Amino acid sequence: MSNKAISEARRQIEICNACRYCEGYCAVFPALTRQAAFADGDITQLANLCHNCRGCYYACQYTEPHEFALNLPKLLAEVRQESWQDNAWPQGVARRFHRSGVAIAIVVIICFALLFATARWIGSAGGDGFYAILSHNMMVAIFVPAFLVPLLSIWISLRRFWKSIGGQPLGPKAGIAALSDAARMKNLSGGHGEGCNFEDEDRFTRQRSISHQLTMWGFLLCFAATASGTILHYVFAMPAPYELVSLPKILGISGGLMLSLGTAKLAWLKPKGDKALGDPRVWGGEMAFILLLFTVSTSGLALYGAGATAWMPTLLALHLGSVLSFFLLMPYSKMAHGFYRLAALIRDAQIK
Amino acid sequence: MTSKTEMDCEVVIIGGGNAALCAAITAAMAGVRVLILEAAPKEYRGGNSRHTRNFRCMHDGPLSVLTGHYDEEEYYNDLLLVTKGNTDEHLARIAIRGSQDSQPWMEANGVRFQPALSGTLSLSRTNAFFLGGGKALVNAYYRRAEALGVKVRYNAHVDHLVLEGDRITRVDFTENSKSHSLSPKAVIVAAGGFQGSIERLVKAWGPEAENFLIRGTPYNRGDVLFDLLDQGVQSIGDPTQCHAVAIDGRAPKFDGGIVTRLDCVPFSVVVNKHAKRFYDEGEDVWPKRYAIWGRLVAAQEEQVAYSIIDAKSKDLFMPSVFPPICAGSIPELAKKLGLEPEALASTITEFNGSCQAGNFTPTELDNLATKDLEPPKTNWARPIAEAPFYAYSLRPGVTFTYLGLKVDETAQVQGQEGPVANLWAAGETMAGSILGQGYLAGFGMTIGTVFGRIAGEEAAAYVK
């Protein structure tokens, strides 16, 4: 962790603690008023609790040119980002991908090529639909490790993080409180339910929280679609392809639409926000991650639409390639925020 | 001159804080074209309102975030207590009564409220807190005003109002070192007091004012106020007085705002630069004691004092933005403060020797007093004995000045021979009519809101 970011964040947080005007915006301020002194772990916790709604910046009487020069959203974004990179395993990979959109794009291209080549030269020993291009067993052989290894990496990172913020053993009460906050994205509500600041300076709108919720819930529905497909395949011996009125299709199409819409809107919003209120070092990496998710969802939908055409094998390679990149990059991309944020919300509920 | 459409207006409002914005919104809603001339750049717009946090509000029953009820008589009595009767009852009651329907008006125009902040529960019945504080309120009002077509010019410093007969005929202002003149039909002055001008403070108070810190904006220099007074407009309020509290001596010269306040005095021993005590630190509870200490410190040599506590009192008050100066012994602390170590040690020893056994209750007057000590400490007197020892330097921090424009109940400014036909005033610039001395938390915003709305309405009616 860079001492510079932490100690600058501490300086700013101490000013906030003497002011307290922003108490109503989000969970960060009530959390900091519970303390008089801030250890490094406390600051990392506050940084991960921050949803970057920016309300405190635009309401602050001490932003530049004032000599106190407060910009808490930026400092917390930097500390948060560094906490993900420092806790990540392995670390070098984390730094590269968080910062570089180009690096993410290269991984996508390699994964696409890999899938394309596998389909072309190894192919399938026969099967229906997509499995005619790439056999079910081959997909499992690629995606099971590509899913489990990153999960293991995240697990290792989160344990480190949990220890650093002084987390207690998990209990149902704090867990439910945190999930409920995340499900409603309470910390992007501005405290008055009118949303957050982002695309038009101090104007409160729901644009960002709606885009985020479409993305988050869309993603979860897609994940549920895949999970339901897996269960149908192994438990009920009902392999793909599925009818339109089937659990995987209903979940997958609605989730895919939400995820496409949400990420498109996030990508459209992102350039409108003031870069200086986040961590500018990772802007490119964040944008590439949004576009990657967009590619995952739209290629999935396109595959549904064009499943019976000559485009199918290419689209399949593109879709599976983007999904593979997404899985592999989970611990080293903006995706990490979901895990850390939830952990911080649980920790906050434990302290409250 | 800048293009006509950019400055085309019927009402010019001088100032860009709460009162100015309430006037602008009200006038614009009445269908009048309004131009705001704000002396500060956009980042510092809003005058002292950007440092405020609440609004004292009368209410017959629970209202928005306010609990219980707070009626006109109780409110007025609270005001009488702090001003010691030095108030214009008629105007004060207009402000008090106006506060009740102003609260929903504020919400309708974008202001959002929150329950009282931690550490301020004593105000949860009487004061409605702004979500995000005063700058958030100011931001919301600018959004609202601009949506209503109000034009705003920043860095626009008004140099002179031409008063001919009973009318203002011209407004001269400088914007980014370019001079402009306008002849609007009506003018509203909401440009605050004059505490931003150290020169004027020195003239009014004496050379000690050089050492005062100004808690709010440096843009309230009183240029428009004095320009009008020089032309014979009637004044109100003691021209030599300002409201000052004791704040952290390390605060910036201007705009330190809320975070520079210190609540440690009642738990401490306060000495001057000769390491001598000079006043009863335990006289009364906040906010009363808070208000007198500015004056007390101003009367000390070099306008500085030191508040000294020991380890057991460190967490009894809100943290200051600056960490206390800390030492393992009293003489060592004295050295760090630049005080004579023996003198401070002897003051503390004498104080400790006069402390009595008894129950210490930090939240109320506990009568734990010193015996045979001059001056006495009449409450919370515990020996300063547990290392480490901590100290804060104190200086007078000026909040506002009392001198203002005399207005009538319609916020109209009064000239030598009756009202100036097209001139109104609102906010700090006329608050001396109501607050003759002292201060009541959140009342400045009440005056600004209520009289800002009145001024906006009257000016619009006049224009039409």
Image (cartoon, rainbow, N blue to C red):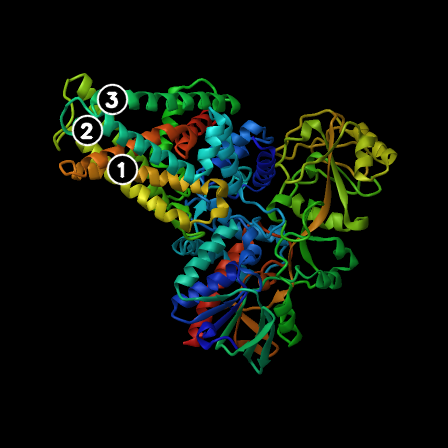
What subunit carries mark 1?
A
Report the residue that reaches farthest toward the bottom: B165
Q: Is residue B204 left or right of residue B43?
A: right
Crowding at dot 3, Cα within 10 Å, few <14 / some 14-19 / many 20+, comes out as some
Seen in the picture, residue A100 relative to A128 is either above or below; the reply is below
Q: Is residue A7 left or right of residue B123?
A: right
Type of the residue with mark 1: Ser
Residue marked by disc 3: A138
Identify which residue, A42 or B298, lies in the foreground. Answer: A42
The secondary structure type at the circle numbered 3 is: helix
Report the residue that reaches farthest toward the right: B342
Q: Are both tags, 3 and 2, on one chain?
A: yes
Residue marked by disc 2: A133
Q: What is the x, y in percent for residue B273? A: 82, 43
Crowding at dot 1, Cα within 10 Å, few <14 / some 14-19 / many 20+, comes out as many
Type of the residue with mark 2: Ile
Identify which residue, B464 or B6, lies in the foreground. Answer: B6
Type of the residue with mark 3: Met
Seen in the picture, residue B353 relative to B170 is either above or below; the reply is above
Residue sitting at x 39%, y 64% = B148
Rendered-image quadrant of the C terminus of chain B? bottom left
How far, Cα to Cα, is label 1 from label 3?
A: 22 Å
